[in-house]
Image: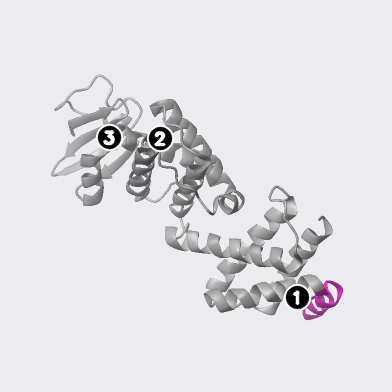
Amino acid sequence: MKIIKILNNNAVVIADGEQEKIAIGAGVGFQKKRNDIVNQSKIEKLYVLKENEKLQQLLLRIPEEHLILSEEIISYAEKQLDTKLNEHVLLALTDHLSFAIEREEKGIHLKNKLLQEIKILYKKEFEIGLWAIQHVKEKLQVEMPIDEAAYIALHIHTMKIQGGDLHETVRQTAIVRDMVKTIKRFLNIGLKEDDVAYERLMTHLRFALMRANHYEVHSMDVEMLEMIKRKFKLSFECAVAVSKQLSATHGIHLPEEELGYITLHIERLRKYQ
């Protein structure tokens, strides 16, 4: 394997037979130059360029340090989550991050309307996002808003094994936000976003949506459900209102057993208002 191009001490473009690849690893490019033989023992990750023309095109139009920053964020995320991310994460995150840095340098700030929901639903990924924007600040002296940490969190989440599709993740997060808005309007209350009961409600609504999408039923004893409907009448009516809004707006139908569990979460919120 010969080095074609040095990206930095920890990343080089190499020729491996007929293929061009990006080799990532601590010290893989240290004191190296073009046509040197790469030390294979230092290679931690390989990305095949020929199989991913978009990545190759991206490298031609962005600063190399943006690619390196993305790889460093990916490595940090994998350690924090104790899992390998999908191989497509390098392209997706680098493309997003480079454009985000470019916007910030031009003074263009994008608000993330799902910031609060992402902070709760994808807590670990959001913490990685916070680390990422601090890392960008330290490396490039570009200060990014907290909204960007949420965008990065979504990319990290969807690139986990079985993490799902980015657009579907954003859609479900927006639906959860709308469900919470319906609860607020119905009960005419303000919810404390740092409250444990609020976090539990958000998490339960997210998993309720996932179950509905996969036609799974969160079972509940019939007698228990009837008791919940009698004892927590207002909260159950609120859950029904959420269900009707969800069906009318998004075509998603929640079974009555699911409404029983949602009722319990709503009642807990009401109790601590």
Q: Is residue 51 above or below residue 235?
A: above
What's the residue type where badge 3 is placed?
Pro
Mark 2 or 3, nearer chain start? 3
State the residue at coordinates (78%, 77%): 225
User: Disc 1 and disc 2: Cα gap in Å?
Assistant: 49 Å
Quarter the C terminus occupies? bottom right
Q: Position of residue 6 (x, y in %)?
A: 22, 28
Q: Residues within 10 Å of mark 3 (few under 14, many from 20)?
A: few
Q: Is residue 229 magenta?
A: yes
Q: Is residue 206 above or below residue 154?
A: below
- Identify the residue position indicated by label 3 in the image: 63
Quarter the N terminus occupies? top left
Residue 258 sits in quarter:
bottom right
Mark 1 or 2, nearer chain start? 2
Q: Residues within 10 Å of mark 2 (few under 14, many from 20)?
A: some
Q: Is residue 120 above or below residue 104?
A: below
| Stretch in magenta | 216-233
Residue 45 sits in quarter:
top left
Q: Is residue 103 visible?
A: yes
- Identify the residue position indicated by label 2 in the image: 72
User: Disc 2 and disc 3: Cα gap in Å?
Assistant: 15 Å
- Identify the residue position indicated by label 1 in the image: 237
Q: Position of residue 255 (x, y in %)?
A: 65, 78
What's the residue type where badge 1 is placed?
Glu
SS at mark 3 in the image: loop
Q: Is residue 74 left or right of residue 15?
A: right
